[in-house]
Image: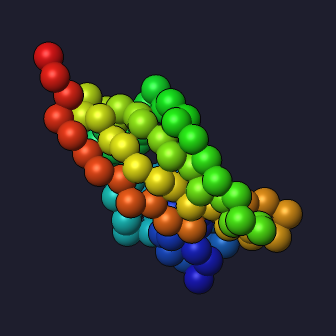
């Protein structure tokens, strides 16, 4: 039994992630387009937009940035974000953002 990219188990190895069987052979119904769009919309509301960098610090390989941004709900989020090395790249090690309601 093979597993597709979406984690759906399919008995036919030729149908792994191809979308040809559309769940008919797997016994799994595909997620409706409207439901996927709704999930993406809700996730986008939590993302930060219009990020403004207020300052930053570096100690060795660790980097801390002080930011101010708006999220999809219109609230202002302020605080530090810590980045640490992860191989050749830097990964977000943590944040401690405080959210304030936006004034009209």
Residue 98 visible in the displayed image: yes
Residue 26 x %, y %: 45, 69
> Picture quarter containing residue 23?
bottom left
Does 62 appear above or below 53? below
Residue plotted at (77% across, 68% down): 60
Residue 66 x %, y %: 51, 46
Residue plotted at (50% across, 30% down): 52
Q: Nearer the viewer, residue 51 or 42?
A: 51
Residue 36 visible in the displayed image: no
Position of 81 with respect to 83 (left or right) is left
Position of 45 with respect to 49 (left or right) is left
Does 15 appear above or below 40? below
Residue plotted at (58% across, 74% down): 3
Q: Nearer the viewer, residue 58 or 26?
A: 58
Position of 15 with respect to 54 (left or right) is right
Position of 85 with respect to 29 (left or right) is right
> Picture quarter containing residue 90?
bottom right
Residue 101 x %, y %: 17, 35
Q: Quadrant of the C terminus?
A: top left
Residue plotted at (37% across, 65% down): 28
Q: Quadrant of the N terminus?
A: bottom right
Q: Nearer the viewer, residue 65 or 18?
A: 65
């Amino acid at each position: 039994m093979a597993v597709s990219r979406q984690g759906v188990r399919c008995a036919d190895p030729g149908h792994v992630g191809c979308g040809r069987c559309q769940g008919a052979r797997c016994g799994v119904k595909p997620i409706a387009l409207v439901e996927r769009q709704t999930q993406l919309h809700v996730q986008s509301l939590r993302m930060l937009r219009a990020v403004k960098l207020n300052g930053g610090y570096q100690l060795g390989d660790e980097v801390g940035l002080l930011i101010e941004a708006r999220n999809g709900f219109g609230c202002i989020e302020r605080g530090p974000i810590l980045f640490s090395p992860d191989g050749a790249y830097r990964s977000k090690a943590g944040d401690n953002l405080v959210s304030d309601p936006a004034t009209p």
